Amino acid sequence: MTPLAPGYTLHSAQGLDALPIHTFHDICKLRQQVFVVEQNCVYLDLDGRDAEPSTAQYWVAAPDGAVAATLRVLDEGDREPHLLAIGRVATAQAHRGKSLAGALIEAVVAEFGHRPLILEAQSHLTGWYGRFGFVPCGSEYLEDGIPHTPMRREAHA
């Protein structure tokens, strides 16, 4: 597992009731900063999936306590038994280049690698996700004008 830079800490919580409200606010703010403002993708980030009791939020706190990186894990068991989806992977601009997103992905794989994992990667990141065992599992498509590729990591014992 990739060690975090000094002062950074990795956290997770399952369900909104286990997540401090200010932390959830900061997670949402970061997602909006990255996806809506930086990438100019107008969409409703608060889609209701964060409120599902099975949704897990992962984040890295910076030395000052700010949310530096985040992702969420969704239960997709209605699509396929035991299937989980990783999404909303984002790192604050001031904290990029510190392997924070990689540490989050590694934490999810360590906890849930015994289950199949899927994600919708921005296509230029397929090689990066490949480092964690994800492989393309479908055709590239455009979402909000950005090429994406579906990826999957099979369950490992």
Image (cartoon, grey):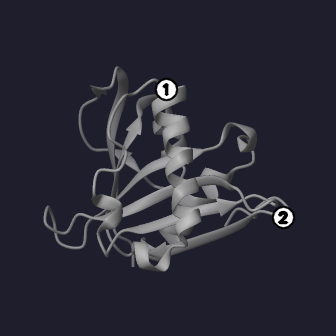
Image point (43%, 59%), residue name: 72
Q: Which residue is mark 2?
A: 7
The answer to whether 7 is drawn above or below residue 134 in the figure is: below
Which residue occupies the extreme top position in the image?
Answer: 145
Screen quadrant of the N terminus: bottom right
Please indicate whether residue 66 sits to the left or right of residue 138 in the image.
right
Image point (38%, 47%), residue name: 135
Q: Earlier in the sequence, mark 2 or mark 1?
A: 2
The answer to whether 156 is drawn above or below residue 63 in the figure is: below
> Observer-nearest residue: 56 or 4?
56
The spot of residue 76 in percent (x, y) is 23, 63
The spot of residue 148 in percent (x, y) is 35, 32
Q: Which mark is residue 39?
A: 1
> Observer-nearest residue: 25 or 101?
25
The spot of residue 48 in percent (x, y) is 28, 57
Image point (49%, 56%), residue name: 71
How many C-alpha atoms fall within 10 Å of the one at disc 2: few (<14), some, or many (≥20)?
A: few
Please indicate whether residue 43 sits to the left or right of residue 31 in the image.
left
Q: Is residue 81 visible?
A: yes
The answer to whether 48 is drawn above or below residue 150 in the figure is: below
Q: Which mark is residue 109?
A: none
SS under mark 1: loop
Amino acid type at image mark 2: Gly
How many C-alpha atoms fall within 10 Å of the one at disc 1: few (<14), some, or many (≥20)?
A: few
The spot of residue 66 in percent (x, y) is 71, 56
Please indicate whether residue 127 sits to the left or right of residue 121 in the image.
right
Screen quadrant of the C terminus: bottom left
Asked which quadrant contains residue 54, the reply is bottom left
Q: Is residue 154 visible?
A: no
SS under mark 2: loop
